[in-house]
Image: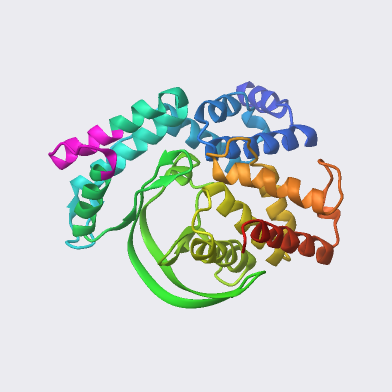
Amino acid sequence: MPSAFPLLLAAATSLAPVPTDAERAKAAETITAVQSALLQADGRRAHDLLQGLSVDALDEKDAQFRECVIARLDSPTLAQPLISPATGQPDAFAGDVLKLYREYWRRSVMAPDQRETELDGLRQGLAGLLGSSPPDLDTALAQTQARLEASGFHLINGQTGRLQDLIVWSTQDTKDENVTLPERAVQTRVFYLNDFQSLGWGSYLSCDRTGTGGWATSDGLYVIVPSYKSLTDENFTVSFLGHESQHFADYERFPDLLPWQLEYRAKLAELSLANANRDKLLAKFAGNQGDAPDDAHSYANRRVLLTLRDHLGLAPDADLTSVPADQFKQAAVTALRDDSAQRGG
């Protein structure tokens, strides 16, 4: 006699509640808030938001994101040997350095009040791997960089936002690019980076959902090629080349700018150049705002949005996406030029 159990199981499964559109929208809003919290190195807030989030309201991609982020915030990091570009063999030192950084990131974002203690722990950990006792963090970082570069790696290991960062790659190409900015045209050398072993703390903690697409120095622009689906759309031509070229120009023109001031100016330049991506950028800025100047991106986002509404004569909470494109672009250009004028430029 056939069992009725499968039929009963199927009936019970069919009774599972289907999330409403409002519940799905709320879940998507929470995922955005999680990404913002992670970018502000607030792991505890991100963790609490994810724990309170119903998996039933998430699509597959966001459910995987939730599981991955919780795992990375909760669990100590495991070591993984990296392959040396110079020898083609596993490099235990490089793997141990990456493990040390990832654990420092995890512990620092989950206990912000212990961040300085964790930073000293990073210094001591690097000293142990180096087999020496560097007197300060800068020396430890420099010695670590030299050791990794000797193995064929390229890297940057300075401060990004509120944490010490580690970005490691194996190959790069260079090309000179001409970029027209709101106030001037600049030519910059662009380094196209590939074959990454680490994309930095923002990318790691968000399971590659967020993170840097590149950066600028006085030597040129560095682009993380895997971060872009295309090198011809506005995500690259505006949000990387335009944004970072503004940094490059400002390093020479206004050498004393604070990090948030650099970001404020670059984001205005970015918005003045954007067409198809304007509303996407506005949503991105609105979703990551903060009041702490030491968190350069979130603080600059708030200042940019407030400044644009002020120039356009709008209320502090007005919808900027409804502003005609030409009028909006002119407001962004005017705000940037006003800032330059105030700095004597």
Q: Nearer the viewer, residue 276 or 12?
A: 276
Relative placement, left or right, of 76 versus 307 is: left
Relative placement, left or right, of 18 versus 175 is: right
Question: From which residue to which does the magenta span run?
Answer: 122-138
Residue appearing at x 57%, y 65% in the figure: 236
Residue appearing at x 58%, y 46% in the figure: 297
Residue 101's x, y, as percent?
Answer: 33, 39
Q: Nearer the viewer, residue 82 or 314?
A: 314
User: Looking at the image, is 333 positioned above or below residue 259?
Assistant: below
Relative placement, left or right, of 134 versus 18 is: left
Residue appearing at x 82%, y 41% in the figure: 317
Residue 117's x, y, as percent?
Answer: 35, 26
Residue 158's x, y, as percent?
Answer: 37, 48
User: In which quadrant will I find the N terminus?
Assistant: top right
Residue 105 is drawn in which quadrant?
A: top left
User: In which quadrant will I find the C terminus?
Assistant: bottom right
Q: Is residue 64 something that shows in the picture? A: no
Residue 319's x, y, as percent?
Answer: 83, 47
Q: Residue furthest left?
A: 131
Relative placement, left or right, of 195 versus 160 is: left
Q: Is residue 130 something that shows in the picture? A: yes
